[in-house]
Image (tube, grey):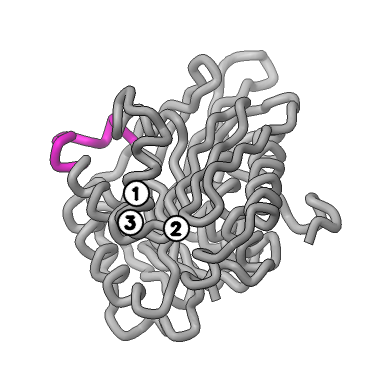
Amino acid sequence: MLISCGDALVDFVPTRNAQGREAVMPAVGGSCLNVAIGLARLGAPTGFVGGISTDMFGRMIADHAAASDVDLNLATRSDHQTTLAFVRIVEGESHYAFYDSETATRNWTYRRGTVPFAHVEAVHVGSTTLVNDRGAAETMALIEDARASSTISFDPNCRPNLIKDKPAYLARMAEFAGRADLIKMSNVDFAYLFGEEPYEQRANAMLRRGTSLVVITRGRDGAVAWHAGTGRIEVAAPKVEVADTIGAGDSFQAALLFALYKQGRLAREKLGGIGADELRRSLSFAANCAVLTCTRPGADPPWSHDVGGDW
C-alpha cells in the first residue's frame, strides 16, 4: 500500500458564468489528497492520512476520494470546518487565498499504532500541513515511525502567503528533506527555498545527505532529476492547451510514485539502484500525467484509461 499524509481541502477555481463574468467553482483539492487521488486512479492501492471534516465540504472530499478508490480508513473525521482555498491564475501560475483557521486539517492528530507501516511501501508528505507547528510535529512523528520500513516522499509545495516566519519554515523544510528518500519540488518552490542557488548544487547536497532522488519540475520546460547512482536526467513536457495548472505538480508526484511502484523500484533499496532507462521512463510518464491535468480545470488527475497502455 502507498499512503499520502497531509492536506485535504476545497479549491474555488476560477471560471466564468453565462454572462461572461468572473465566477468560482468548488473542486476538491489539497496537495496531499491530490497525490492520493492520482495514485489510486492510476491503479495503486492507496490510503490517505489526515483530517477531513464532517461538514458539507468534508462530505464532498470524502465522496470524491471514495469515487477514486482512495482508502479513508486511516483519515480522521471531525466536526472542525474544511479548509477553503480561492484560486486566481496570474501569468499562468496559480495563486491561493486560504481560509484555514481551526480546520479539520489543522486539528489532525497522528494516531500512533494505527498505520500498518510493515505493509506500506511509501509515505508521501508535504504542503500546507507542514506550515503550522502542530501539523508539522504530527507529520514528523508519522515519518519517524514509517522510516524503518517505508520510502519517504516529500514535496514542500510552498505557500508563502501562509508562512509567518520564513527562517523557521526554511529550517523545518530542511528537516523534512533530510528524512526523505525522494524529494520533488517545482522551480517556484526552489526559488522560495533556495533563491538563486544552482539546482545541481542543491540537489547534490541533498544526495550526499542520503536522499536517493531529487526532482525539479519546471512547467512547460519539463523536469530535471538527479539520482545518487544514475546522475542527471532531463525530460520534456508535451505541449498542450492549458486550462489551468492546478494540481499539475501533484499529478506529477503521484505518477512518478506510481511508475516507480509498477517497476518495482519504490522500496528504498530498489530506488537507490534504479537504472537510467527506468528513471527516464518514470519521469516521462509523470510529465505526461501532469500535462493531462493541465488540460482540465481544477485538480483532476488522470485515470489509468487516460494514459493508455503505458503500464
Which residue type carries mark 1? Met
Q: Residue at x 51, y 56 (%)?
A: 229
Q: Earlier in the sequence, mark 2 or mark 3?
A: 3
Q: Amino acid at mark 3?
A: Thr
Task: Examine the residues drawn in magenta and state their main secondary structure.
Answer: helix
Does residue 168 belong to the magenta stretch? yes
Q: Which residue is mark 1?
A: 206
Q: Position of residue 253 (x, y in %)?
A: 54, 50
Kindly tell me whether residue 79 is visible in this rendering. yes
Pointer 3: what residue? 105
- The answer to which image quadrant residue 8 occupies is bottom left
Label total for image: 3
Q: Magenta segment: does it hold 126?
A: no
Left-right relation of 129 to 268: left
Q: In the rendered image, is residue 57 in sight?
A: no
> Real-space Cα distance between discs 1 and 3?
29 Å
Residue for point 36% across, 70% down: 76
**Crowding near the residue tagged with mark 1, few <14, some 14–19, many ≥20 C-alpha atoms within 10 Å:** many
Quadrant of residue 42 within the rendered picture: bottom right
- Compared across the picture, whether 295 is left or right of 23 comes to right
Q: What residue range appears in magenta?
A: 159-169
Q: Amino acid at mark 2?
A: Ser
Q: Give how far across and how far down residue 95 sits, in percent.
A: 43, 26
Residue under numbered circle 2: 212
Above or below, 12 against 55 in this view is above
Residue 98 lies, in percent from the top left, at: 34, 36
